[in-house]
Every structure is written in C-alpha cells, then in structure tokens.
Amino acid sequence: MTATIVVGYLPTPEGSAAVDHAMARARETGARLIVINTGRNGDYSHPNFATAEDLDALEQELTDAGIDHDIQQPTNGQPAALEILGAAVEFGAELIVIGIRRRSPVGKLIAGSTAQHVLLDAPCPVLTVKAASTLG
C-alpha cells in the first residue's frame, strides 16, 4: 500500500513552502500527495481559496515531478482544519504538512488557529513549515 501525505495548500509563501516540503518527502518515499485547499470558513472569495490558475499550475508542477497526487478544493463550508483532518483520516495519511506564519499571541486568540487545531487533533505526525525568510 502506498503511503499518503496530506498537505494544506494556500496560495501564499507558507502554502508553497508546505507543498515544496511535501513534494520532497513524496519523492523520497514514493508517497501519494493529497492537496487540500478551501476557503476561510465558507468564504470562497477569500484569498486563501486558490484560483483555477493556481491549481492548474500546481497540478502541472506535481505531474511534471512524477508525483502521484490528488488536488481537492472542497466547497462545503467546513473550516480548513476539519478538511485537512478529514482527508488524513479518509486516506490513512502517514503525515500532514502545513505551512505556518508568525502571529502575535493576541492575533492567535482573536482569529483562532488552523495550525493549532491540526496539531492537536491530527491522527498522524504533522510537519509544520515556515516560508523562507527574506531577511538577510
């Protein structure tokens, strides 16, 4: 049975970093990637909801890399964390990869945290990835 990696994708530097790390792991292990992108709590006009062009480019990148994959963009109003966790359970994921960004403690309290939800409730190990720093 082929291993599966679930990766949360946003069209952001953090989301790209998560996909890059998941692709590297998939190349090393021969795992299948399940890429999940969804709107913010049912808001499909939010910038987190990838455009068709974003998804087409990602599809091409994964295909060109020879990585077995499935890109899912659910539109059922579920929060991103629930979609990622649900996919991990459904596909028996051995790993979840998510991008994280730095947020203030107050920002975490007000907005909640998808990453925290995934970390606390994941049925498998979770790899959190930061985008490459532009500070030199």
Image (tube, rainbow, N blue to C red):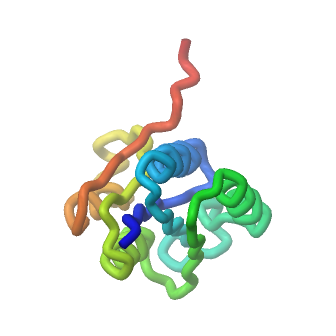
Name the foreground residue: 127 vs 62.
62
The residue positioned 47% from the left and 53% from the top of the image is 26
Of residue 105 and residue 2, the one placed in the foreground of this image is 2
Is 88 placed left or right of 59 in the picture?
left
The x, y position of residue 4, in whole percent, is: 40, 66
x and y, in percent, of residue 35 in the image: 53, 65
Task: Tell me the quadrant of the picture where the C terminus can be found.
Answer: top right
Q: Quadrant of residue 44?
A: bottom right
Q: Is residue 16 visible?
A: yes
| Picture coordinates of residue 90, whole percent (x, y) | 36, 81
Q: Residue furthest right?
A: 53
- Does residue 90 sit above or below 129 in this rendering? below
Residue under the point 36% across and 59% down: 96
The structure residue drawn at horizontal position 36% and vertical position 46%, both measured from the top left corner, is 128
On screen, residue 39 versus residue 54, left or right, reads left
Give the farthest residue toward the bottom: 76
